[in-house]
Amino acid sequence: MTLFTLGPAGTFSHELAARFDPDVRLCPSIAAVFAAVEAGEGDGLVPLENSEAGSVGATLVGLADHAVSITGECTIPVRHHLAAPGVSVTFERVYAHPQTAEQCSRRIEAFGLPVVPTASNAASAIAARADPSGAALVSDGLAALYGLAVLERDCQNSGANETRFVRIARTPAAPPAPCRASLLLDPTEERAGLLHALLGPFAARGLNLTRIESRPSRRGMGRYVFYVDGDCGPGWDDAVAEVARFCTVKDLGRYGSLAP
């Protein structure tokens, strides 16, 4: 099975995808991964959230806009190092993907230098390699792949920095038991107590919701949709049916953990 993920070569997405499938295709953006999966060209592997920087917006948009399902999840530790073309370089700027920059915000502030945003961690490495006055926040693997010297290790804010990835496919997977379920809730009305009404049916059935996040609906200011993850158990379908009375529900998938 072909597995699409974010490139260029050496991204965390690429390293993880290679553990799951030998046929990995690299895409220029997360949006391109979703497009390939929806077109039936293969499965995809995308980052969903980070323990420091939160959700990956492009992945949430992809889940909302494309006819795909989450079929598995995997969480990996993430370490970022400052690297440059040479150990004696005096750098004047730092290349970093926006998620990486947020995960390393304290160290970046201490540098006191401008941050140049990039499309991926691999793009950061490529940019630093071509810039005699540039450095990049990258992984060990990227530094080695692009011939960069590590100047400072572990620039991330937290030693427990982790990123959760999800595998996506055009058709849902047969869920294991127990499993996690993900939903996108789009309220069809505005009223007092709406959030309580969305969450109450799950609480009433003793169902644990592991993640709740509001995002702009993209239909105007003050209108939101809600991404919900939960431990799927007896009563889950009944809770979803109750919520669907005042909310459009998109089932994003039921899935288990992936072992790389």
Image (spheres, rainbow, N blue to C red):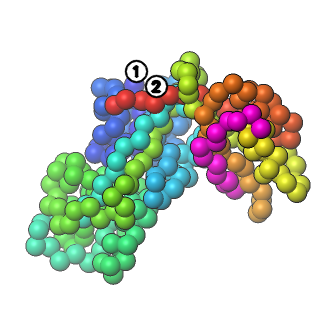
Q: Earlier in the sequence, mark 1 or mark 2?
A: 1
Please give the label number shown on residue 42.
2
> Disc 1 versus disc 2: distance between alpha carbons?
6 Å
User: Looking at the rendering, in which quadrant would you find the N terminus?
Assistant: top left
Please give the label number shown on residue 150.
none
Using the image, determine if residue 1 lies above or below residue 149: above
* Residue that lies at the very extreme toward the top in this rendered image: 174
Q: In the visual, does 224 lie left or right of 75?
A: right
Residue 134 part of the magenta segment: no
Query: Which kind of residue does numbered mark 1 sit on?
Result: Met
From the top left corner, tell me how far across and down residue 253 is, in percent: 60, 30
Asked if one can make out residue 101 in the rendered structure from this viewpoint, the answer is yes
Q: In the visual, does 180 lie left or right of 247?
A: left
Q: Residue at x 82, y 46 (%)?
A: 197
- Range of magenta residues: 204-216
Query: Which kind of residue does numbered mark 2 sit on?
Result: Gly
Q: Residue at x 45, y 59 (%)?
A: 52
In terms of secondary structure, what is the magenta stretch mainly? strand
Mark 1–mark 2 CB contact (< 8 Å): yes
User: Looking at the rendering, in which quadrant would you find the C terminus?
Assistant: top left
209 or 62: nearer the eye?
A: 209
From the top left corner, tell me how far across and down residue 100 is, in percent: 39, 60
Q: Which residue is drawn at 87% across and 36% down?
A: 245
Q: Is mark 2 on a helix, strand or loop?
A: loop
State the residue position of label 1: 1
Q: How crowded is mark 2: few (under 14 residues within 10 Å), some or many (20 or more)?
A: some
Q: What element carries label 1?
A: loop
From the top left corner, tell me how far across and down residue 240 is, in percent: 76, 32
Residue 214 part of the magenta segment: yes
4 or 130: nearer the eye?
A: 4
